[in-house]
Amino acid sequence: MERSLRVQVLVIGGGINGAGIARDLSLRGVSCALVERRELGSGTSWASSGMIHGGLRYLQKDPEVTRHSCVDSGAIQRIAPHLVFRIPFVMPVFAEDPIGPELVEVGLEMYDRYQPFKNGRPHTRLSRAEALRLEPALSPRLDCAFTLDEWGVDAARLTAANALDAAARGAHLWTHVEAVELLREGARVTGARVRDRLSGDAWRIEAELVMNATGPWAPKVARLAGVEVRLRPAKGIHLVFERRVSQLAIYARGVDGRDLFTFPHEQNSMAGTTDDDFYGDLDRIEVGEDEVEYVLQAMERSIPGIRAHRVIHTLQGVRPTLYGFGCYEDELSRDYAVVDHAGAGAPGFFSILGGKLAAYRLMAEDASDRLCAALGVREPCRSATTPLPGGDGTLDVRAVAARFRTPPAAVLRLAFRHGTRAEELLAPWAPASGVPPRPVCLCEPVLDAELLYAARHEGIRTLTDCALRVRLGVGACQGAACAAPAADLLAEALDWPAERRAAEVAAFAAERWRAGMPVLAGRQLAAMEIHRHAHLAARGFQAGARSARAPVRAAARSAPAPPPDPAPDPATRRTLARWHAGPDGGAEPS
Ligand SMILES: Cc1cc2nc3c(=O)[nH]c(=O)nc-3n(C[C@H](O)[C@H](O)[C@H](O)COP(=O)(O)OP(=O)(O)OC[C@H]3O[C@@H](n4cnc5c(N)ncnc54)[C@H](O)[C@@H]3O)c2cc1C
């Protein structure tokens, strides 16, 4: 008989909304399971701009969305102070702009009223000379400019932090596990049959309630329950530059009058985004040359030198926007809906649709309130006041860097992602171990310590997961230099045989290649190919092929092996057993 597990709530979809709901429910003591068919946050959440803002552009038509997003941004800043960063924007105004400076300023004055909710500063008006002094990348053609204050977050890490916190509080968390069928008792939805996409294992998760939190996939999952969910999915792309192209985030205007912007993210700059109806395959979102050109053209008006910077890859996703008819994509509401499908003949089944990353916590609270009401649970929401892992204090970066003999820049990066947990992560590398942490990749200084922590304590299952979880291979080398040494470390930690290790490197290289393809051309394309093959061949791997040739363990030869991990605590052991061994590890089979 098929294995099964029983929980109060099954959450399908490990994007920011599913992870947020699982955390909220776990904080209220509700037993739940969260299944994600790929890596956490790998759908729309990772493709977002990561702004936790009210959205100046929504102010005119959707002021309530602006208000609740700003309020929730304030809450996210409180619970995850390590994961957020201030993004000062500058908005140039040109003589030919359809809206002149006076009207722009009226809009900004309105937005100022919402700034206190998210700890933002009011706007300022800059003369042409002041603007160019502040941001030399700006076009000297500008008339004047305004400053505007926003906040950003690493969306993939925010998603993982929510899911990992839920798991630490008792939730069952599975990645690379897909809900393939919904269980029914009469009309009632009573759980799902799930399948591990890596091992092929299948089992049943029985639940009193099922929450469909699958973002743009929501209509597909709803069809499993025989109900219709209508979205107006809209694709958006970003270009990711090798280095920062400006000091500040900069507004730009598309040829069609849309607002776009470029903003710094870690050592890269990102530029975007587009907003186009999308009816294609959600598992294969391609980026066309016209989209790349549209973004560059818009940016060029604000930053004339933009084309001299190297774009290393694109990031694309599909917004799960609420359905709307007769308007352009940009004009669609960014509001959200929590739907109880009982009225449509599927009691026990709910969907969460639309919304914004910036309001994820509030959306999760609303959804969890509805689920708790249906379960008869009276516990209040605690997600606005309980810090996410690592968000309970401030790390003394210099002291930790000195103690672990690690460059402060690398510790700063750990502090950004892990907050106060960075010290726990580095513990096996304490001076007594005699082995200092080493970078696996130099273009994004990912430490071996962080990678091994992700494998040993955070349930990483594939090398490709690491691009999201620790930003492996998303810098200039696009994995060419770091995929093989990272695979060596994961193979050691996760006990992968040589064939698996080779297949992981090939899959990672293929994924990074897909991300880079839309922006590679001519000599850059040739240079990247040579670079990639040279790096991988030097370590015994063949890019793009599922070669089983034994990888050369250069890392092991040239440097001491990393220290072993101290035995994980029982809670971590249980969580890891569940991640890697289906429902039997740690769960009560029914
Ligand atoms: C280009 C772009 C820029 C954006 N910028 C911003 C911004 O700056 N600020 C902001 O607030 N919002 C922004 N957004 C919106 C924001 O990203 C989304 O609202 C949010 O990420 C949606 O999260 P989600 O959890 O609903 O969906 P997703 O992140 O897509 O998560 C759904 C998950 O469900 C999984 N799944 C699907 N089917 C199954 C199944 N059968 N079994 C198990 N798992 C399944 C998928 O793999 C996926 O990971 C942007 C969106 C885009 C596209």
Image: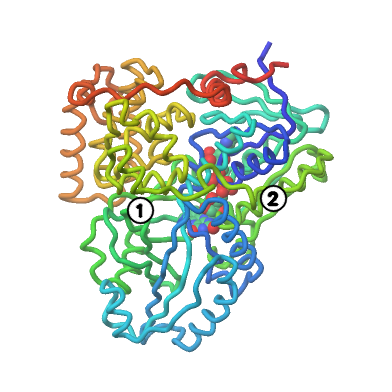
Residue 549 image offset from top left, x and y in percent = 24, 17
In-front residue for pair 583/279: 583
Taking the view exactly as shown, the residue that stands out farthest to the bottom is 102
Residue drawn where x is 34% and y is 41% of the image: 514
Residue 365 image label:
2
Residue 73 image offset from top left, x and y in percent = 57, 60
Q: How many angstroms separate mark 1 from mark 2 (CA)?
A: 30 Å
Q: Between disc 1 and disc 2, whose residue precedes?
A: 1
Q: Is residue 182 above or below residue 155?
A: above
Tell me where residue 571 sits by quadrant.
top right
Q: Is residue 10 above or below residue 219?
A: above
Label 1 environment density (alpha carbons within 10 Å; few <14, some 14–19, many ≥20): some
Is residue 337 at all visible to an observer of this figure?
yes
Is residue 235 at all visible to an observer of this figure?
no
Give the amino acid at mark 1.
Glu
Give the amino acid at mark 2.
Glu
Tell me where residue 11 sits by quadrant.
top right
Tell me where residue 452 sits by quadrant.
top left
Residue 266 image label:
1
In-front residue for pair 230/21: 21
Position of the N terminus by quadrant: top right
Residue 517 image offset from top left, x and y in percent = 29, 46
